[in-house]
Amino acid sequence: MDGLHDVVNEFRAVGSTGSHICAFLHHEGISEAIFQNAACNLANYVPDLPATNQESDCLSALKDFMNWFQTTEGLWDMQKSLDIIIEICLYSLIDFDPENCIYSIYLLVHAWTLTIIADGVLICTCTQYILSMSCSWDSTLRIIDSGRHFCPTLMQHSKAAQM
């Protein structure tokens, strides 16, 4: 029973971290593709310049969070992602638009979540890394689109992901 309790606590912690990261995104137009692309690109990320201690801490926390959503082979685990989203939805914290496959956070919940984050700088920086790593580039350095709502929402998310 103690092992199950640990799994439930870990599950809730991942859901909480996900909610905190989403608080630094725009409250509308959140797609799974943002996280899926970032997880894929994070696996191969090597900073061009030496990372500061804060950047190293952030990258470590981000890798821990993103690894939770990956299979042992490093692929995106849609079931784990869905499980976390269902957990968050149970508390009526987000809404899903099935036609466009995007999520939104209720405005009051979004604002409230920002007030309860213990380390806002760390979470905001993690969110900025996620956004920057969510883009895939072709050989001409153009963004490879990940769905019709992906690129248009990146700008609004980038503006929201600031302290």
Image (spheres, rainbow, N blue to C red):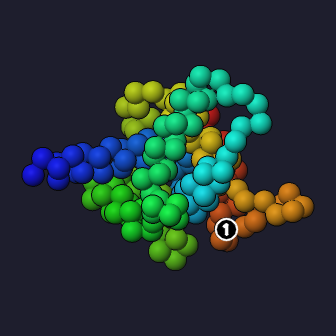
Q: Position of residue 33 (x, y in %)?
A: 58, 63
Front residue of 109/51: it is 51
Q: Which SS class for mark 1?
A: loop
Image coords of residue 139 (percent x, y): 87, 62
Q: Is residue 123 left or right of residue 7?
A: right
Residue 105, x across and y down, in percent: 44, 53
Among the 4 quarters of the image, the one containing residue 51: top right
Is residue 38 visible to us here? no
In terms of depth relative to the viewer, which is nearer, 17 or 163?
Answer: 17
Residue 37 percent across, percent down from the top left: 61, 59
* Pointer 1 local density, CA inside 10 Å: few below 14, some 14–19, many at least 20: some
Please tell me which residue lies in front, 57 or 161.
Answer: 57
Q: Is residue 141 above or below residue 148?
A: above
**Left or right placement of residue 77 versus residue 55 in this view:** left
Q: Which residue is under mark 1?
A: 146
Residue at 52% across, 71% down: 101
Q: Amino acid at mark 1?
A: Ser
Quarter of the image for residue 126 reads top right
What residue is drawn where x is 42% and y is 53%?
A: 68
Name the residue furthest right: 140
Residue 146 seen from this side: yes
